[in-house]
Image (cartoon, rainbow, N blue to C red):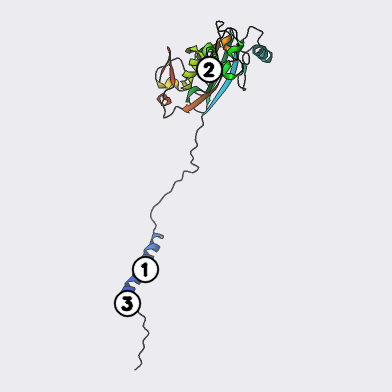
Amino acid sequence: MTDDNTNIGLSRRRVLGGLGAIGIASAGAGLGTTAYFSDQESFEGNSLTAGTLAVNVTQQITHIDQDGIGPDQLAWSDAGDGEAGVTTDPIVIEDAKPGDEYEFCWEVELEGNPGFAMVAVGDVSEQTGAEVGTVSADDLYDVDTDADMVTIGEAATAVATLTLCPEEDEEVGAQVEVFEGSLEDLLAALSEGLVVPSSEELEGEATFCHEIECPVTLCLEISIPTSVGNELQGAESSFDLSVYAEQCRHNDVEQFGNATVVAPDGPGPA
């Protein structure tokens, strides 16, 4: 008798495991061949594109009065026949004296989307002639000490006005005076920022939302009174002016914090 010991080795677990594998394969094959009613519709080429917001500022020298003989007025007149002119260079007055008057304007216009606009100054520097080092009280017969000398900001008066976006039936928008006082106080106020209104009808937040291509103009009139004397000699004043714009959508004017918000009867706290 021959002992045919082939030892295939199929235990119960292996048999059941093999059957299970066969069952899974069968089920998988069935999914691909079932014929149910079906349909399909496609929407192709979908996209999201971010919008844009840009602020354009046009800087102008609109008035220089140095009695017709000052070097800054003569240079300005030669450049543009004494008419308001656009300049992209820093505004520089090199020979300011008592009695002089100046006006500088910045036209603010938004592009792309409606937005809020805030004007602010920074890097303000005010120095007397003694602090600059060009003049000292010893050089001046009627100034006792260097402490008696004054800055341009202390001596000069300033008026800030806004020409708003014109209404549909207007050619020129309304003018709003937003400040009158010393140049020093104006620069201090603008260091916190000035939120610029968009129209004369200042009722609610929407009036501060600027539509595109509807400019607003900020003008600064600076005058040095003739009552100021030698204590002003050699003084220097400088500052940077910036315009910041932010979208109106999902936003409100309160986010500008301590900035001054212009109301119909003048500036007020935010």
Q: Position of residue 144 (x, y in %)?
A: 55, 10
* Label 2 sits on residue: 217
Distance between mark 3 and mark 1 Cα atoms: 16 Å
**Other residues around mark 1 within 10 Å, as few (<14) / some (14–19) / many (≥20):** few
Return the x and y of residue 52 as percentages of the image width and height.
51, 31
Q: Residues within 10 Å of mark 3 (few under 14, many from 20)?
A: few
Q: Are marks 2 and 3 in contact (CB under 8 Å)?
A: no
Q: Please say if the residues under marks 2 and 1 sit with CB atoms less than 8 Å apart.
A: no
Q: Residue at x 48, y 20 (%)?
A: 190
The x and y percentages for residue 231 are 56, 10
Disc 1 residue type?
A: Ala
Residue assigned mark 1? 21
* Residue 254 quadrant: top left
Residue that appears at 50% across and 16% down = 184
**Image quadrant assignment for residue 88:** top right
Q: Quadrant of the C terminus?
A: top left
CA gap, disc 2 to disc 1?
81 Å
Residue 111 against residue 92 in the figure, above or below? below
| Disc assigned to residue 11 | 3
Q: Is residue 20 left or right of residue 213?
A: left
Q: Secondary structure at mark 2?
A: strand
Q: Residue furthest left?
A: 12
Of callouts 2 and 1, the N-terminal one: 1
- Residue 75, compared with residue 255, is above or below; it is above
Percent position of residue 209, x then y: 45, 23
